[in-house]
Image: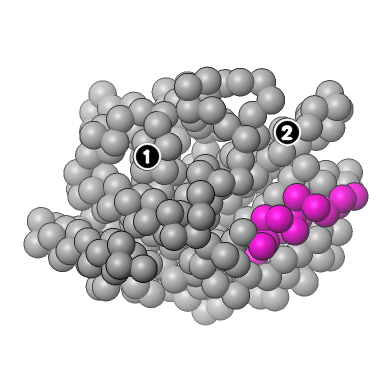
Amino acid sequence: MNTLELQKMANEVRKGIVTAVHGAKAGHPGGSLSAADVFTYLYFEEMNIDPKNPNKPDRDRFVLSKGHTAPGLYSTLAHRGYFPVEDLPTLRHLGSYLQGHPCMQEVPGVDMSSGSLGQGISAAVGMALSAKLSNESWRVYTLLGDGEIEEGQVWEASMFAGFHKLDNLCVIVDNNNLQIDGAIDEVCSPYPIDKKFEAFNFHVINVADGNDMDQLREAFKEARETKGMPTAIVMKTLKGKGVSFMENNVGWHGKAPNDEQYAVAMEDLKKVGEALCQK
């Protein structure tokens, strides 16, 4: 896909996120919206995957370490063709396969169940090591929240990945600077994030705007070309991106819009889509 096509798809993914969380009357829209562009880039451009064959052995793997942003992953998987977009409003409903955290046994395209913060990167590191031991060429991508990296397990996994030179591993940090209790630098600052990963023998790529497709394209190209060490992409993003009243507002970390707010949000995203169509 070219950049404009990716931008249009990311906007559709955002519509799916808002629709899913509204349908659930619960969920995590803020961090899902900030990561919508990287979700879109990974599944529509970067990763070797096949929605018609979700378990093909040589596929690239993705682990959503910040599992509470499942609405973002679900919307992306649906738009990529893993399951019907019409199922998104069943998020968190009794009997739905789309629950609050991703379940690999239930959701096509989910490579690892996640939700306990810090554990996803550990699973991703294990997958990457497995690929190395088996001389497989597939890559592993994992998305972490910047609040999540306050968890000690993240750094145990990073130490292991750096020591074992897992250059088939790409760790992505969604640095929107907000977690459930407020700004991360006021709650328990993990800054400087890049220097910490460097200390664990990672190649680090700082992305000034993780909501910009061209910058993401350059970062993932550099990650693929990096040999002998894992890569960490630290991308600055806007929490709630695309929805006027959610942008950079910590209150929308884990709250669903009511009917009136849903209408405003969808109108915001409709305008974004219309502007993209005029480019």
| Secondary structure category for the residue under label 1 | helix
Residue 258 x/y as whole percent? 14, 57
Q: Quadrant of residue 29?
A: bottom left
- Residue of label 2: 138
Range shown magenta: 218-234
> Which residue of the protein is positioned furthest toward the left in this rendering?
260
Determine which of the numbered discs, if any, sits on residue 147 in the image.
none
Identify the residue position indicated by label 1 in the image: 79
Query: Which tag, 2 or 1, sits closer to the chain's start?
Result: 1
Q: Residues within 10 Å of mark 2 (few under 14, many from 20)?
A: some
The outermost residue toward the front is: 279
Q: Is residue 163 left or right of residue 185?
A: right
Q: Residue at 56% of width from left, 46% of height from top?
A: 45
Percent x, y for residue 55?
57, 21
Q: Which kind of residue does numbered mark 2 sit on?
A: Trp
Instruction: Assess disc 1: are there few (<14), some (14-19) or many (≥20) residues with their C-alpha within 10 Å of its C-alpha.
Output: some
Q: Nearer the viewer, residue 191 or 43?
A: 43
Q: Does residue 65 appear anywhere in the picture? A: no
Q: Is residue 225 left or right of residue 252?
A: right
Q: Residue at x 82, y 54 (%)?
A: 226
Q: From this viewpoint, is residue 207 visible?
A: yes
Badge 2 element = loop
Residue 233 is covered by the magenta coloring: yes
Residue 216's spot in the image, x, y percent? Answer: 59, 61
Q: What kind of residue is marked 1?
A: His
Residue 250, position as x, y percentages in the image: 37, 71
Residue 235 quadrant: bottom right
